[in-house]
Image: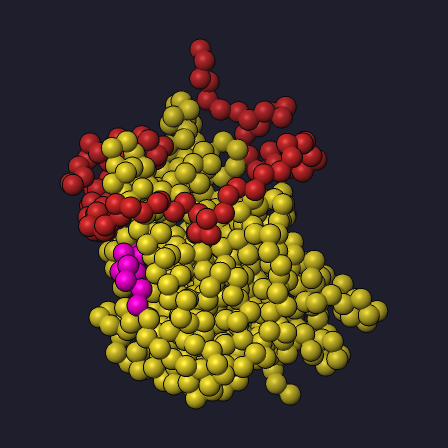
Amino acid sequence: MTALHELTLTAMRDGLRDGSFSARELTAHLLSRIEAAQPRLNAFITITADAALAAADAADARIRDGSARPLEGLPIAHKDIFCTDGIRTTCGSRMLEQFVPPYDATAVALLAGAGAIVLGKTNMDEFAMGSSNETSFFGDVHNPWREGLSPGGSSGGSAAAVSARLVGAATGTDTGGSIRQPAALCGITGLKPTYGRVSRFGMIAFASSLDQAGTLTRTAEDAALLLGAMSGLDPRDSTSVDAPVDDYVAALDAPLEGMRIGLVQEFMGEGLDADYAVTVRAALAEFEARGATLVDVSLGNIGLSVPTYYVVAPAECSSNLSRFDGIRFGHRADNPSDLEDLYRRSRGEGFGAEVKRRIMTGTYVLSAGYYDAYYLQAQKVRRLISADFARAFEDVDLVVGPTTPTLAFGLGEKTDDPITMYLNDIYTIGANLAGLPAMSVPCGFVNGLPAGLQLVAPAFGEGRMLAAAHQYQQATDWHRQAPEGWS
Amino acid sequence: MSIGSDDIEKLAVLARLSFEGDELGDITDKLASIVAFVDQLGAADTASVTPMAHPLDQVQRLRADTPNADIDRARLQACSEATEDGLYLVPRVIE
């Protein structure tokens, strides 16, 4: 029999339902792997073993009495950006080191309501600001494919945990690539839905016009299972969208035949690792072999996506993070001389260097005299980038390309130069600026490290995109490869 | 444009942040390089372009302004380090 940790989320569900194993057996097995992996990977900030085992017993009872819910007994982890009632939620920051929320994020509540079991909260870049998981107050996460390399970020702990087979799936958030980039670097499947598809209530805000919750899983089929349970209108999030949630699992069987796929020319040139480009072209040949038509598309303004993002996101972050004042929650400085000193030292001590850089950048681009030149101009360029995608989708069903310009890089390699780090997200940021659903699927290896293929769909085209990824995964086994020592 | 230590102090006051020791030189250098990087946006021709504030161009959905029982003050204030009788404690601001 396949080891329990090797099962996909869908296979875990089937095994629980047919009585091949119990939720307690599955949960206990994965908890023991998490404990053993923690000194090597540091993928978790908080492990919720007792609560998980109690939930597993309750799940077993439901399965026995025939009242199992869609995700009953399935072991997952949440990125530590999602508020969890009674469970510490740090957002990777000293600011929230002791913060215990009094409520659940809607995504957390929906998954719990569907029967999923939370094994813990995963490590992440502080306030989701980073592309390497190195800005976390709780230490670096290591890539299971090669310790000493970054798993990517900001959802690096979630990606490492799924890749190392510590959980069946994990949640993440994606503001500029924070699900797709770590998914690519860790050899798993990562999906960022359409902006507004999943509620942002209880998801600690970074950049409100860009943030979106999504999934990190081994397969597209698992992503479909999880996304269906997380999505939908939430009256508590005024930006969540009132659009019907498709049956993503039922949509998986749609064939690639007749589908038109556009390869973004700007993503295949300078800056892309040459061997990475070869794996992407080989993956696209597989799509063609299964009946898809591949054409070239151009996104003429996409070269400005990174500077646009690094105006819009810091501007929104400087506003959102003003709530951390040292008074109502979060770190509070000792012996303040006055209120101003309390604010400045609480924030100065509570935030790390990258978060402070982004707050300062945001304050600068929003300040008098600079607003038009930076913030307003970035909002205009954002529309140009969005219009480029809209034009491309007049001709194709999906646009595709590499997820990242390089493979996993060394911890400490890019920390001295923020611009070099920011350029990691050069292929992923466009989908956030345009609010589009996008995902990364494993598409091969270069020197033993995984590469990712990115698919981007029109708004609310998650079903079609998942089907394309699923059909590709039926023909390939890149997504089944486990890092050495973790299978 | 160049960013000097005076600009950094002004921004730090606006952002309610403190920087200690080596942090000040680091933020001055790195903010200057970030601003130089985003300066390339100025070259884009956006004369007839409407700014995009929402990725799907949706308007804010409103709900009825009615009270509800969502907020449990005691549980919310348990997150704070200093409260008393349902109030937050801060340094004296009025002598």
Looking at the image, which residue is at 31% across and 47% down? B49
Residue A201 shown in magenta: no
Q: Position of residue B82 (x, y in %)?
A: 54, 29
Left or right placement of residue A58 versus residue A169 in this view = right
Q: Could one spot residue A267 in this view of the protein?
A: no
Q: Nearer the viewer, residue B61 or A216?
A: B61
Residue A302 shown in magenta: yes
Q: Position of residue A399 (x, y in %)?
A: 40, 70
Using the image, determine if residue A286 lies above or below residue A183. Answer: below
Looking at the image, which residue is at 26% across and 48% down? B46
How many callouts does the rendering have? 0
Q: Nearer the viewer, residue B18 or B21?
A: B18
Using the image, determine if residue A22 lies above or below residue A429. Answer: below
Q: Position of residue A453 (x, y in %)?
A: 40, 74
**Quadrant of res A448:** bottom left
Looking at the image, which residue is at 41% across and 31% down? A343
- Tell me where the magenta segment starts and ends, as one range: A298-306
Output the letter for the chain in yellow. A
Q: Nearer the viewer, residue A220 or A118?
A: A220
Chain B as rendered: colour:
red
Q: Nearer the viewer, residue A401 or A243?
A: A243
